[in-house]
Amino acid sequence: MYEPQAICDGGDLDCGSGLLLIIKKAIDPIASGEILEVRSRERTVAEDLPAWCRMVEHDFLGSEPGEGTTRYFIRKGQSQSDLKQDLAAAKGYHWSVRTQSGRDLTAKVHSRNHTFVAGQPADFSAKVDAPSAIDYLLASLASCLVVGFKALASKRNVEIDDAELTLKGSLDNILYHMEIEDEGSPKISKILGTFYVSSPHEEEQVEEIWRDTLKRSPIYQTLIETVQIDIKLSVVF
């Protein structure tokens, strides 16, 4: 259909989760009028990419199905946004949440277009009205690793059939947090878990992606400085 001068693969990324930066990095070196091929498995790209091209004055030439992916073609326009400026803006991005006191011992958290409720900071009851801060912390670590792993695997064209991470965390002394005892520390002492991955690819490839996931995880790299974390990888075939 077209003869591209450059190709980039966005895997399962959408336009709001890093694909546009990948495209900008790939299209920056080619000359105006030349063609970039973008490969993607994310269905929303079909709607979002043409709109982005119109906004930055590239020509969206169309798409065609590929092997397990869709190929999109972009002709580079004359007017370009500064890639260095865009990367600097990404590096300087600040996340923001707003938290209000809720009913009883709860808090209502507003994060972008989402709202959720948090319960007591640390609670070991079997049933609670809302997850505790400890639950959310463990969930934050787990989701950062699972989604980060899938994103890296997608960019490297490694198929993942299924992935599941179970985590358990414990405090040095929850009774100190609850003011029942006056000795000890309320800090999280250790986090243990197992990451189960099913993939048709070689185990060494999966292990390499997992190691890179840990290196690039904001939550893991922040916590590992102060908390003992031991997550074992179990590859299932």
Image: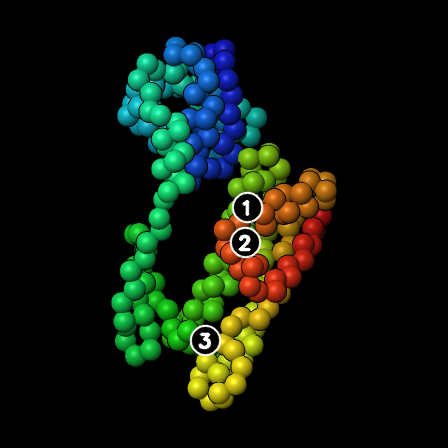
Name the image colouring.
rainbow
Q: In the image, which is nearer the foreground, mark 2 or mark 3?
A: 2
Q: Position of residue 11 (x, y in %)?
A: 52, 34
Q: Position of residue 195 (x, y in %)?
A: 63, 56
- Mark 3 crowdedness (10 Å alpha carbons): few <14, some 14-19, many ≥20: some
Q: Which residue is drawn at 29% across and 60% down?
A: 98
Q: Which residue is drawn at 56% across and 59% down?
A: 225
Give the labeled residue for mark 2.
221
Please report contact status of discs 1 and 2: CB closer than 8 Å, yes or no. Answer: yes
Give the labeled residue for mark 1.
216
Q: Earlier in the sequence, mark 1 or mark 3?
A: 3
Callout 3: helix, strand or loop?
loop
Give the labeled residue for mark 3.
122
Spatial separation of the CA atoms under disc 1 and disc 2: 8 Å
Q: Which residue is drawn at 59% across and 34% down?
A: 156
Q: Which amino acid does label 3 sit on?
A: Ala
94 with respect to 189 (left or right): left
- What is the tally of numbered marks visible in this picture? 3
User: As displayed, is residue 176 above or below residue 95?
Assistant: below
- Mark 1 crowdedness (10 Å alpha carbons): few <14, some 14-19, many ≥20: some
- Classify residue 36 by image quadrant: top left
User: As displayed, is residue 218 above or below residue 171?
Assistant: above
User: As displayed, is residue 186 above or below residue 89?
Assistant: below
Q: Position of residue 113 (x, y in %)?
A: 30, 52
Q: Where is residue 231 in the image (x, y as percent from the top left)?
A: 64, 59
Spatial separation of the CA atoms under disc 2 and disc 3: 22 Å
Spatial separation of the CA atoms under disc 1 and disc 3: 28 Å
- Mark 2 crowdedness (10 Å alpha carbons): few <14, some 14-19, many ≥20: few
Callout 1: helix, strand or loop?
helix
Q: Which amino acid does label 2 sit on?
A: Gln
Q: State whether residue 71 appears in this view.
A: no
